[in-house]
Image: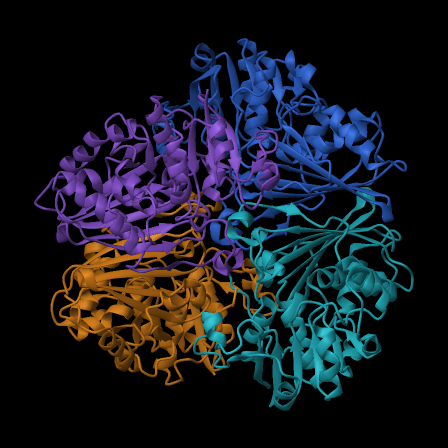
Chain colours: A purple, B orange, C blue, D cyan
Amino acid sequence: MTRVGVIGATGYAGAELVRILAGHPAVKLSVLTSRQYAGVPFHEIYRSFTGAVELECEAFSMDSVCDRTDIVFTALPHQLPMEIVPGLHANGKKVIDLSADFRFSDAGAYESVYTAHTAQDLLAHSVYGLSEVFTDRIKTADIIGNPGCYPTSVLLPLAPLVREGIVVPSAIIADSKSGVSGAGRGLSVASLYSEVAESFKAYKVAAHRHEPEMEEILSGLAGTAVDITFVPHLLPMSRGMETTLYAALSGDIADETLYECLADCYAGRRFIRISKTGRPPDTRNVRGTNYCDLGFVVDRDHGRLILMSAIDNLVKGAAGQAVQNMNIMLGLDEQAGLDLTPFPV
Amino acid sequence: MTRVGVIGATGYAGAELVRILAGHPAVKLSVLTSRQYAGVPFHEIYRSFTGAVELECEAFSMDSVCDRTDIVFTALPHQLPMEIVPGLHANGKKVIDLSADFRFSDAGAYESVYTAHTAQDLLAHSVYGLSEVFTDRIKTADIIGNPGCYPTSVLLPLAPLVREGIVVPSAIIADSKSGVSGAGRGLSVASLYSEVAESFKAYKVAAHRHEPEMEEILSGLAGTAVDITFVPHLLPMSRGMETTLYAALSGDIADETLYECLADCYAGRRFIRISKTGRPPDTRNVRGTNYCDLGFVVDRDHGRLILMSAIDNLVKGAAGQAVQNMNIMLGLDEQAGLDLTPFPV
Amino acid sequence: MTRVGVIGATGYAGAELVRILAGHPAVKLSVLTSRQYAGVPFHEIYRSFTGAVELECEAFSMDSVCDRTDIVFTALPHQLPMEIVPGLHANGKKVIDLSADFRFSDAGAYESVYTAHTAQDLLAHSVYGLSEVFTDRIKTADIIGNPGCYPTSVLLPLAPLVREGIVVPSAIIADSKSGVSGAGRGLSVASLYSEVAESFKAYKVAAHRHEPEMEEILSGLAGTAVDITFVPHLLPMSRGMETTLYAALSGDIADETLYECLADCYAGRRFIRISKTGRPPDTRNVRGTNYCDLGFVVDRDHGRLILMSAIDNLVKGAAGQAVQNMNIMLGLDEQAGLDLTPFPV
Amino acid sequence: MTRVGVIGATGYAGAELVRILAGHPAVKLSVLTSRQYAGVPFHEIYRSFTGAVELECEAFSMDSVCDRTDIVFTALPHQLPMEIVPGLHANGKKVIDLSADFRFSDAGAYESVYTAHTAQDLLAHSVYGLSEVFTDRIKTADIIGNPGCYPTSVLLPLAPLVREGIVVPSAIIADSKSGVSGAGRGLSVASLYSEVAESFKAYKVAAHRHEPEMEEILSGLAGTAVDITFVPHLLPMSRGMETTLYAALSGDIADETLYECLADCYAGRRFIRISKTGRPPDTRNVRGTNYCDLGFVVDRDHGRLILMSAIDNLVKGAAGQAVQNMNIMLGLDEQAGLDLTPFPV
């Protein structure tokens, strides 16, 4: 069995990795690290894992981690992964990084929204892990820059249409809504129950760090500059992300053609479920799973396409897509360990 | 004291009217009607009112209602008000109707999305009750068509800008999100707690009945046809509505100019609170009150204005604005009975 | 593969059976029935199952169901199962009934809280399906009366202590709290989102139908009459049930002895997780799973044991325990298909 | 107008004081202090107050506060009030303290669960502010120890019955459930939205600091030692507290007698609403108000009284009762500023 380590296992994305990997038939969790909880059994931090996960959290040590793993997930705040991924890579480990550090091929784009990049030479080796879109490159990758949750929810519906020139590449609007687990387990007044309940609001309007990530990928697919106005909002719920996209059609394109463009692109890819009838996707239907549900409606009066996606921000938006990428890298069925049926209610 | 009746008092908007009117210093609740609960004390239906409201619900009777009221709120499903408003009007009662029946000056627009209109002659007498925008006409009105919650959340931010020609009248997008109390107290699986919790989704995409209502009012203000793409979404919370609007600016307009356009239009109107600093409004900050909070950001890279509003769908979006209209009609301070401070948490 | 039918598949317990059985390695879902949705694909009722469950709902037909199943779950309101279980039994099908119809060995006890029992002769054949307590009898049963969610949450913590005479059999108090999915998918104002959110209350105080079910089982285990005061409460959440039990200790019994009594009784039974340190169980830690978490504290000042349990009312309290019983009846590992790790958040 | 200061205005109880006092007809908010937010306008911390509260938070200064107030509320963590209340008192200010520091007449009882008491001489001057029970003493008090939320929810239903000897003073059980705003605005993982949602659990089982507070007051009323087993639980909602009490009746006492005992004790006290018909109180019906709703059922089979209360933990359990006490101290109508109608939904 492939031995797997999770660096930063006690944040929400890390814990979700543990949930999925603990039930994976072809890999074995061998190392969990946590700066804050070194020495504490993982199930004492997340009691739900009692009886299911016996590992103890440990402080990160390069040698020890390399000795006991074949593949490593890094679920750390950005800037930390670029300090340790070079070492893991040098030791021959495959790495899937859930931060932004290895998502950009252009260090300048990264630096414009984050900080100085100290492992720029590895950017050429890293592949953007949008599983269904860059499958072939992921197969042979050593380092994956796993997409952010917002970009995943924006790119999966748009990628096929942008690639085929079906939507006008300028003037795309993405109105996204995310559950609060996306803000992580860090302490902040804004994440307290009493502040989130019965609250809905936008934040970082047209100024979110994920906008350049989306534009770099879309422009690459379109072969021309793609502009996007991105407005994220915070939902009073834990998990789930919905994005409603507005774009001008490049011509008088039939619903059937739009459906086929999406369906052809994602043929045989189980995690993408596309509604033929314009039914809007609901976050509840993907909760706890790796699904991305898509729906669309054309506002013919205004020649405008309305395209909607729903994902679980912690699964398809983070840990689930990361495991899917691992499966692809290891030559496994991409669904391995991800056969998760959502709750009916 | 002015005697006030509420026809259809046991739906959510009706009950919210009772809440506000029970604490109003210048009027007295005199009649509550309910088909379903005739003969039942109101506080047995809504236990929270025990000790605060002693009235019993009664079946509607034109004569009895007219004998015991000076002004009447109708909080019924559309189509019912047009059956009784003519009689109330003929008996000299002022009427504020919370349904769509008296919102349109053009019966054809109404009929295109609802049903045949059987009281068309009264449409010329009715005034659209967007309190801060049509104040003068409301002062002398006999019949008010009280705006829907979605139109209120769209029109209050847009009205000043459209009137001044600051935004391009075509290509406006309204992405709205509503708490589920907007669906009312009627029984449907979609409104059950277990179906709503941890769920977020769009519905009636670009096909909602409120779109023509918005376009009629905006076109009137702009003096030219205004087009809007409107997509409503359902939030996992009871009360609250947020709308994020996207529009092209008609020129290179400074933030300060935008702020002044809004601030001038709403000068002296306490219920409109405008953020100078682009802070997005939060539904929590208006909960239970008649406030409409506004904020905006210009995405200069794309020449696009992002305009946001937050209201309580049951208050400024229904019962609160209705009482504000009553205040204006009666020559009272428009804030009377509406001095509601939202909870800090 | 054993062929399995679910009669009444579209209620919440039925849909949860579908969720669990769809992922079960040793059985195959072959029939789903629904009066209301006959002819509709199951995944059109519960969209989350799109791509995972292809079966269509059908009207119940005795012959057709018997031809195509080996074992049948009945997830119907009480009174309906006793009409069809005799026919299923006569056709040699094993039956697991989730209603109250086959929970009582004494028809009089059933009739005192429900209605006339029309299949009394089968009561002698039916076994009360409290999986960890009546395992041996379940192995050879043809008909299982699957326990209610409240009784499961009360009986699992109490059974070992009552059997050993460790608590005084009179004067037991059970203060239970349930998520609203327990009320099912039926339409009622009390189940609407806007009525449940931010609400907590008791209901059917000391008058709930589950009290006799609890007392019959406990008295059987104790070999003497056991009295219980049972007060259920409704929680503002979908899934989860917590019960806090108060009982007098029959002597000066050490914490260690109490722990051992519970631990010995449930040795080797993975779904029962007992805290050694008095940590109160949390419904979040069992959500979506078949676990029953237990904790206890002795209030030594008052010689009183406080015993707490947490389950998911739809899983260990309904569908999960039903599948566990099926596993036991079929000679499978009792955990088959129930290896569900709860979400960390 | 009486000038009022709030020391510690930015915690949840402090902010709730601001909400209520801002709408009070007979007093004027003159000072708000906050260590953390000195120099920040209050409405920038709680945006909901924009346009309603103009005061700026300031650091505490004894002289400055005494110059500009007549009465002072201290809403600080325990141990801090006993440092400043002596100074306020020496300057002739009336003080209402929301912490535990002045709730005990016996310093030893305080010290057994908190810390060394450094202002013991003032305990003789302070009055326990359970408004409806100790009204006469509150009228003439200089210092009020405002009750905790849990004790309020336990004492209001029990006080009349314990005083009349109707329940057996030993063997009382209080099973309480609180919304999370009771934990305050302090940062802790346990208060994060994603940790609280869909979670219900007990905590500090039979070990909560409020137990001695309850027992001291009840024993005083009963004239004999009263024992209580108290188990608090945490609800997935912001505001609201329900307590279900279990007690043995001291004889064969009719429901009518029980009702009259409660009704007589609270005759003329609007905030106590008692159900005659055994209807369990619902936290939703008191939300945002100073009501305490009571209901009871006798489990005649077991001779046990089940008594239930519902309050808003931040209002009747904290800020509302504090303002009610201020009203009584100032000779105002006890309802002044507290005429708050709860939301219907």
Q: In this view, does B284 lie to the left or right of C94?
A: left
Residue D248 in the image: above or below residue D161: above
Image side of residue A39 versus residue B291, left or right: right
Q: Is residue A174 above or below residue D146?
A: above
Q: In which quarter of the image is residue D58?
A: bottom right
Q: Measuring from the top left, give residue D197's x and y in whole percent.
A: 53, 48
Q: Residue at x 51, y 62 (%)?
A: D344
B160 or A86: nearer the viewer: A86
Q: Where is residue B154 in the image (x, y as percent from the top left)?
A: 28, 64
* Relative image position of residue D63 (x, y in whole percent): 65, 88
Relative horizontal placement of residue A312, taking residue D141 as reference (left or right) = left
> Which residue appears farthest toward the right when viewing the image?
D224
The quarter of the displayed image where residue D287 is located: bottom right
Nearer the observer, B194 or A18: A18
Examine the rendered structure and indicate whether residue B244 appears above or below residue A223.
below
**Relative to A287, is A129 on the left or the right?**
left
